[in-house]
Amino acid sequence: MKMTVVKAAGGTDELEIAEGTFGVPFKEHLIHQIVVAYQAGGRQGTRAQKNRSAVSGSTRKPWAQKGGGRARAGNIRSPIWRGGGKTFPATTQDFSQKVNKKMRRVALRSIVSELIRQDRLITVDEMQSGPKTKDLLARLAAFGVTGRSPNVLIVAEAVDDGLALAARNLFRVSVRPCDRVDPVSLIAHERVIMTVGAVRKLEEMLA
């Protein structure tokens, strides 16, 4: 299987890639499961409320059980009292879901293969840039990604500081090293630009 590589200096070249990694069928049910698990892992789940044992206050019985003419009361921390605890308090929760490494690799192979079939993946020989956003926009235009606000994910073998600074002002342009590519970013962006080094490293990771 061959992939077209766009050169920064102009022209194109061909790159031989493994069909078992970049030519697999699209598995929608698996990708949906992986994306849901990834987004669930991003939830903080740090909400917390106090029950009757966590609020401040005495545990002494406020008055005698009988003889006072008032309703019986155990302590002032009761949920029916002002300043008491919540009856069913919200507690911290872990929303993360377990995903096997094999499932994640299969899902990433399926996503990358579908990007190639839809012509949304652009392979370039190198993607180094200075810290100026204008220079990055010009380089993206040379690769066929135009517009004042391009929606693109740049995947490099190693991200340099200049490329990260240039993409920081473009809110729909993301830069990731190859080993930190996630399924949500690959799906969310309209185009994905990947260097040859990143393709080789990704091919090794997903083999």
Image: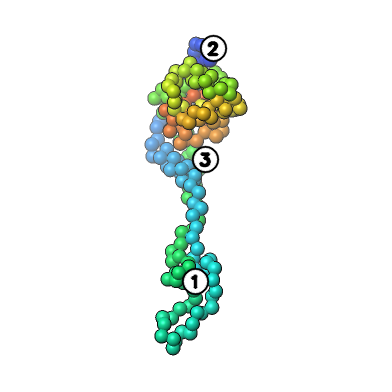
Q: Quadrant of residue 127?
A: top right
Quarter of the image for residue 179 reads: top right
Q: Distance from label 2 to label 1 (Cα)?
A: 73 Å
Q: Are marks 2 and 1 in contact (CB under 8 Å)?
A: no
Q: Residue at x 49, y 60 (%)?
A: 49
Which amino acid does the dot numbered 3 rest on? Lys
- Residue that numbered label 2 is attached to: 9
The residue shown at (38%, 39%) is 29
Q: Secondary structure at mark 1?
A: loop
CA–CA distance in space, label 3 to label 1: 48 Å
Which of label 3 and label 2 is nearer to you?
A: 2
Which residue has dot 3 on it? 101
- For residue 5, above or below residue 149: above
Query: Can you see residue 14?
Result: no
Query: How far apart are the alpha carbons under marks 3 and 2?
Result: 38 Å
Of mark 3 and mark 2, the one earlier in the sequence is 2
Instruction: Farthest residue to the right: give it.
Output: 161
The residue to which callout 1 is attached is 77
Closer-to-camera residue (182/200): 182
